[in-house]
Amino acid sequence: MADVPPLRDCGAESDYRSDRSSLVEDFYLPALAASTSYDRAVGYFAASVIATLGQGIDEFAVRGGSMRIIASPYLEPADIKDIEDGYELREILQRAALRDLEQAVEDQRAARGLGKLGRLVAEGRVDFKLAYVEERGRVGMYHEKIGVFRGGRDIVAFKGSANETRSGLVGNFEAIEVYRSWDPRDTDRAARISKDFEDLWNNCTPKLRVVPFTEAAKVVIERSALATAGRYDLDELPTGGAPIATAPQPPAGSLAIPQSLAVRDYQKEAVQNWFRNQGRGILRMATGTGKTLTALSAAAQLGSFLRKNDDNAPLLTIVVAPYQHLVDQWAKDIEWFGVTPLRAYESASKWSPRAHNLLQNLALGGTRGGVIVTTNATFGGDSFQSLLDAYGGQLLLIADEAHNLGARHLRTQLPEKAQYRLGLSATPERWFDEEGTDALTDYFGEIVFEMGIGEAIRRGALCRYTYTPVLVELDDEEAELYADTSAKIARLIAAGTDLRETADRDSPLGWLLKKRADIIGHARGKMEILRTEIEKRRESSHQLIYCAEGKHPILHEQGTDGPRQIDQVMDMVGNELHMTAARYTSETQRPARQDILRRFERNELQVISSMRCLDEGVDVPAARTAYLLASSSNPRQFIQRRGRVLRKAPGKERADIVDFVVVPPAGGDAIQYETERSLLRRELARVEEFAYLAENEAVTLDVLRPVRERYGLFDT
């Protein structure tokens, strides 16, 4: 380590005040240059102090300096309400702190400074923690402002009005008191402030609680480092103590595209096409290509456009997503765009009062925008429909996985008053439901942008993949039940049953079709083959296993009980193969789901077993291998499942898909030949789709050649 100037020679005075000195140039930078460590505890830390320190951080890092920073994030009303509703406190604090950081790095100097911390964070020389007041079940914010510089045995401690924010260090009128350990008049105070910080850092201060934050902040730090790499022009501060200039911020509640977001060319094209279609249309984009960020960029641009024409025009944005965990996922992205959305699901008593307050604020001009994110179920309910009826301003409706809203009970609830409409789906066509598909295009408009998986792979938006179909024979009992069920289906169709009933699982035809699909999904031969495939990758991480829902239809036929397929998988993987694994199903509670995905991303879990919960919208970019034990003939499902594993992630060059293709038993009854041929035709349609874009297409098709020959299916 290079020699460090003694801290007592840095020229620190006993106090600093904006009318007679510069807090930055006269105190912070000289003290930092003479220190080996810097501790700071402050209310409302927005990280932009790093922009002010500028080059000082570079020199500090070269010398091996270390930092510890404690902050208290700003809690918005929605955060406080979530705390009162019992949501996990630590997650809410981290969410609020990340929002502070995201807002701070809208200024490029702040992003540059924060990015410089990346090296120190990676080397374990910078740590962040969050502090909050906890007393008698109430949560309050920590407002104390103290700092400690250390160099050898010397200490310079300070306290005062300056926050670690842009305006707290340049541009505001501030004052701090400084205590130097070598000055007999200051020794006790310097030691006391230093001890106060140590107690705070170690969570030993009564009434205060302190939790780690470094890991959560890494994402913003790394993004800032990439966005401002080589931007030495951002190291210099404005002269004369002028505040650092920031881009004009949109009004409260209005979305804004983050400066750190690199919007891809195809996403810009999608937004432009939507605008050309008068703010209506469907984006048909492959899973993993960034539909969410594209939609939010469109919403932000719409808000900006409306404000240019009428500065007082409010815009309410409603986002409808299929499930609660997708609402939470949307909420995180919306916060990155500068708005804390109102999440509407579960009991209306939790969200309805706040939603009506938002509408009232919009009507009275108290806010210019707002975002509500809700589930399909809540959207279709009376409480939410009443809310929509009460709103009379500009309305943008964004439908995630828009095909779901084509269902009969939901399409009638789509608000005609929404002037702007945006549907998102990789597969907007509804399976065997032309009426529902037509209703979607009638409401949202035509498909204005399309990007399939092939183009997404070519453009680098998704990763390349290999595809391995493995053949699984039905046993004799399964083959007989399959043929019998197919015969019943044929008789219903021949009798004139409306084919629209195929989408209704409660109808006789829909029930039989589901039963037949379940026979394929639960084929008993899959388990032993799965063991063989997993043993090949026993040391590998990031594996997904898609299981069939429910129980084997033969168990229902016999009136007996037995383990579900997912239970058999978990027993095999966890107990027999001793791999770290977790299940992710509709029964998994929301906090547990988030924990499972975090552990999977960090390689603390090798395997996740799921049924339908990972089909739509859930981000699992770390996944490298997917085993498709069960795939319906509905293209939407297997396209969604392929998309889950093709998402890009650091260090991920390629994905592997192992598909369990069900075939009839060899030497079957000639009477069942056509039934078996139809079964294969349905399975091969999926195989063809997957193989076409795989890197090993030729090898894949060779695997199926013997079966094609047996059933004369070379035309498929």
Image (tube, rainbow, N blue to C red):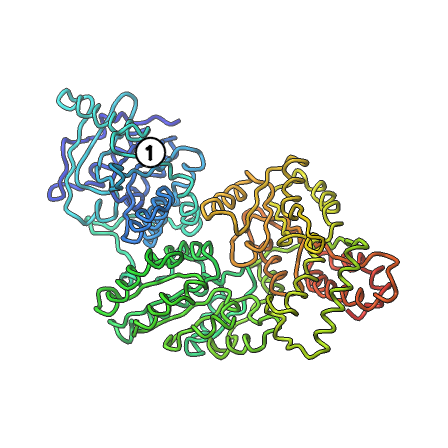
Q: Point out residue 317 in the picture as x, y percentages from the top left corner.
A: 36, 67
The total of numbered circles placed on residues is 1
Of residues 319 and 610, the one nearer the viewer is 610
Of residues 599 and 266, the one nearer the viewer is 599
The residue positioned 21% from the left and 45% from the top of the image is: 168
Q: Which residue is mark 1?
A: 68
Q: Is residue 620 left or right of residue 154?
A: right
Q: Is residue 528 left or right of residue 274?
A: right
Q: Point out residue 394 in the picture as x, y percentages from the top left corner.
A: 32, 73
Within 10 angstroms of label 1, few (less than 14), some, or many (20 or more) residues?
A: some
Q: Quadrant of residue 212?
A: top left
Q: Point out residue 100 in the picture as x, y percentages from the top left corner.
A: 32, 49
Element on which disc 1 rests: strand
Label 1 sits on what residue type? Answer: Arg
Of residues 109 and 382, the one nearer the viewer is 382
The answer, for residue 390, to whether it is visible in the render is yes
The quadrant in which the C terminus is found is bottom right
205 above or below 584?
above
Extreme front residue here?
A: 559
The answer, for residue 466, to whether it is visible in the render is no
The residue positioned 17% from the left and 28% from the top of the image is: 179
Q: Point out residue 670 in the picture as x, y percentages from the top left corner.
A: 88, 65
The quadrant in which the N terminus is found is top left
563 above or below 641?
above
